[in-house]
Amino acid sequence: MTQRFSTTPVTALPDVIATAHARSLGVGLRESETPDFHPLHRPALRELVERNHSLYTHALPVMQTLHTQIVNTESMVLLTDSDGVILHSFGDSDFIEKANRVALCAGVSWAESERGTNAIGTALVDGQPTVVHAGEHFLHANHILTCSCAPIADPFGRIIGALDVSGDTRGFHKHTLALVRMSAQMIENHLFTNQFADAIRIHFHAHAEFIGTLFEGLAAFGPDGRFLSANRSALFQFGRPLATLQAQTFPELFGMALPALLQHTTYKPGECVTLTLPSGVRVVARSEYAAGARPVFRSSSDEGFDGGARPARSTRSAPSPSHNVTFATLDTGDAQMSAVLRRVEKVRGRDIPILVLGHTGTGKEWLARAIHNDSPRRDAPFVAVNCASLPDTLIEAELFGYEDGAFTGAKKRGSVGKIVQADGGTLFLDEIGDMPLAQQVRLMRVLQERTVVPLGGTRAIPVDLRVICATHRNLRAMIEAGTFRDDLYYRINGLVVTLPALGERSDLAALIARMLELQRDSDAAVPARVSDAVLERLERCRWPGNLRQMANVLRTAAIMAEGEEEIGLEHLPDDFLQDCDAAPNERRVSPSTRAVQPMNVESVENVASGKMQDWQAALIEQTLARHSGNVSATARELGLARNTVYRYLRQRRAQ
């Protein structure tokens, strides 16, 4: 069912009921029919809830609040999908038995085509808030009910579900529909904020006291000022349909240059300004944005808020190709990799945690992004956190967020944290084995309760997310050593897959072609292929840095060969050629002999005792030399935490 909301709220009138009854007769329903008592089976219901994960998660706390407002009225609160199938409900115990008699329970469809005229089905057909009272229901069996329902729209105006209060006819109250409509609008605003977390959001209303309330207008814009979407209140204030607004820009809708407003927000955060709508109506507004969404603009002492700020050329880099990676992107012909992808595909769209093992640089984040991009959560955020790169003192605030004043140096107005940023989408925790024990306890609580409490806060924030973890460590050994919690381990390893090292893969030529293709997407001067001599040389390498190392080698070689048809030996870095010449051909190792033994903190700390392979130590030395001793650049190229490189240097000096 594809439907868009009406911007004019209308309750059910006699002609609405009459039209709905006519539709019911038209599909062959009979008033005396007995309700269907066959809801979806549990697995099918779970899958349906997963497909509607964002709606379900954002609606749940609102439903709980709504239920407290109508408790002890012999009624219940219900959430449905866009087809009218009930996803969840809260009800008074004295009404549940009566509701079950008419199949008012999870997994049952209340579409108008199956139940005749009823608040849920009719509201979804008309796209309007609707009350159906007692005998207005088409089926006689439903005359015991009074139902008030409001459709729920996504941030682009498409109806994705409905919120309903159904109860005994004797408990009917004319204000119930108003409560339902307000609750539905609250859910829509939560969905809107989540959808446009990385956009520039404008909160506005003709009356200042309504800013920050349910009734404020919300409009989202891209960094270039292009209109993205708006909530119901904003559409009402603009007086224009969503389709018309799609062609508008921020200056056209608010009469001011966007950089000027953002400059004001930067220097006076939280302070409102006055803007003018196309209709001439003046509104009070404030803006907010994530750090990456804000355009770069020039500011100086003689460029003030009056519009003098001029956009400067953006310095943001192009998005990484991994943002668009899919299972098809990763399947380049290697049997081991194909087997991993087939296993992961089987849990696509299911709420099963995945643990990805593999050497550093084997593409763990690429796999995580592919899982996200090929799942029902693809339109929601993908948030990646490298647990090894964050100092112990910051990882708690980074993950869980914090309130204003939670600790010295905390940002004003606090920070939501990575977990809340991933709400509705996917949280990727890379190097989970490097997470401190104290934070493992907090993470375990989040995964178990699906809520997070920021540092310095008291309110639990509900979150709906899929968690994918990755590590190059042996977590079972860490559990034995007491450095990793066994309860967290069993929570994150619903499905465990191991990525093959590059030296074991049989699809090197295809990988090279794919990497060059991705580079050519952003730079047409990149050669389309490598020469046969280069391919032969690359196949002789051990690739200790795996895919990350190969990507860096090809990126450098492509720059050296810019404008030429192919990459030749003369374009490869000298130190890389030396590594290849010195390394025997150890590619295509049998999977049965494969073990996850990448360079890690333990091996670095044991250099003196000879536990670290010579080539690993040499790789750190060569990379440090290439970067003139720059530890950050070395760690970034090798995919290590800076602390790991520092530990190695301390061990080397101690020898």
Image: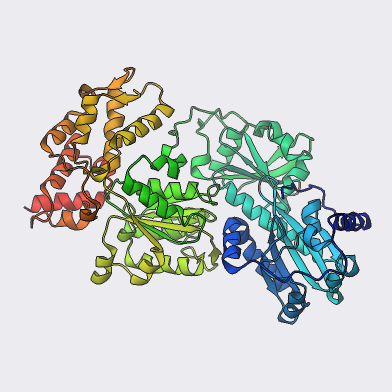
Q: Is residue 430 above or below residue 42?
A: above
The residue sitting at the bottom extreme is: 94
In this view, the residue in front, 383 or 125, is: 125
Closer to us: 306 or 563: 563
x, y percent for residue 598: 22, 52
Which residue is found at the position 31% from the left and 36% from the top?
551
Q: Is residue 171 visible?
A: yes
The answer to whether residue 632 shows anywhere in this view is no
22 relative to 478 in the view: left or right: right
Quadrant position of residue 438? bottom left
Q: Residue 534, position in %: x, y?
A: 22, 27
> Is residue 173 placed above or below 534 in the rendered structure?
below
- Say which quarter of the image contains residue 263: top right
Question: Relative to 612, is 450 on the left or the right?
Answer: right
Up-down relation of residue 245 to residue 544 (above or below) = above
Most distant residue in the left direction: 655
Residue 424 lies left or right of residue 340; in this view the side is right
Left or right: where 509 falls relative to 172: left
Number of numbered callouts drawn:
0
Q: Position of residue 344 (x, y in %)?
A: 42, 54
| Colouring convention used in this rendered image of the protein | rainbow
Residue at horizontal 24%, vertical 22%?
Answer: 568
Q: Residue 310: image x %, image y %? A: 55, 27
Q: Residue at x 51, y 32 (%)?
A: 299
Which residue is depicted at the point 32% across and 63% down? 436
